[in-house]
Each structure stands twice: as C-alpha cells, then as structure tokens.
Amino acid sequence: MSIEGTYLFQGVGKDTLKRISEMANEEGHAAGTFLFHAGDPAEYLYILEAGRVRLRVGEQGYVAYVFSAPGEVIGWSSMVEQEQYSSSAECIVSVKVTKIDKNALLPLLEKDAPSGSTFFRHLASIIGRRLINCYRATVSVHGERDPHSYG
C-alpha cells in the first residue's frame, strides 16, 4: 500500500501528496526490533505497510495497542508537538513501514493549508478512535465506576 491509499492522506492535494511520497522512505525491521522507544525524540511518523507492531507503555511495558493493518499510523506524537514518544513500538514480526520526517512534512502541510487541514482532521479521527478503544478496554477491565462522560 502506498501513502496515497492510506486514510491519513486521503484528500491531500496531488502536488502535496507527490512531495510527501518523495520524502517518504520505506524501511524494513526485523522481529524484536523497535521503531522507537518511549522518551526518544518524536521525529518520525510511520505508516505500516506490512507486519505487526506492538505499542508498549509504562516501565512494565504494558501492551496498549497492536498495529497489524496496512495503512495504520504509528508515532503520531511527532505530529502534535510532542517532544518525545510516549510509548515504545516493537516489531512483533518482520515489519515494513514508510517513514516520514516530521521536520519535512509539517512545513509542507503548512504551505498547503487545505491539505494540512484534511491531514490533521484525519489524524484527529485516528487519535479519537484509539482513545475510544482505550476507554472501552479500561471499562472492560475495571468496570464502569464513574458516570461522567469524557468525550
């Protein structure tokens, strides 16, 4: 799958998409390696092409999420003004990703405001879905204890 086919980049202008494709690098990683560790500088956005990546949080390395579908976004912290990754991304099996440098991507999206708006709207949707999944997982483990809504 190319970045053109991923949800995150759907609706981005053709010229901008072409430039993003030119700056993107495909990488392969062996099982057991890490794309990044919690605390590393958040410099890259990754798009999963093939394989499975486990997102781990906390000192105990609790599994927070497993990426397995082509087109899934890994390392979105890099795009939302986070200095460091908040989790670690471990390759469960051999993985192929597309890696994009945020320092090249952000100025490009700023120059093309409609494409930037589309990109960040899609990113917000991705983050929102993951947050809802976290809420559901928490409720399934701990039960509903608080009647307040957080969404």
Image (cartoon, helix red, strand yellow):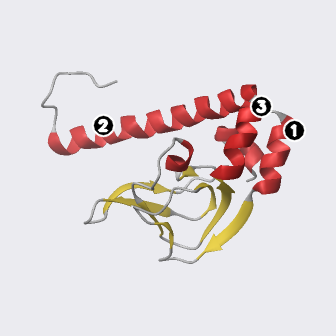
For label 2, the residue is 135
Res. 98 visible in picture = yes
For label 3, the residue is 112
The answer to which image quadrant residue 149 occupies is top left
- Using the image, determine if residue 123 lies above or below residue 86: above
Tags 3 and 2 touching, CB below 8 Å: no
Mark 3 vs mark 1: in front: 3
The image shows residue 17 at horizontal and vertical percentages of 80, 42
The image shows residue 63 at horizontal and vertical percentages of 34, 59
Q: Residues within 10 Å of mark 1 (few under 14, many from 20)?
A: few
Q: Residue at x 74, y 44 (%)?
A: 5
In this rendering, would 5 be left or right of 83? right
SS label for mark 2: helix
SS label for mark 3: loop
Q: Nearer the viewer, residue 103 or 94?
A: 103
Q: CA–CA distance between discs 3 and 2?
A: 34 Å
Label 3 amino acid?
Asp
Q: Which mark is residue 15?
A: 1
Q: Residue at x 53, y 47 (%)?
A: 76
In this rendering, would 113 be left or right of 29? right
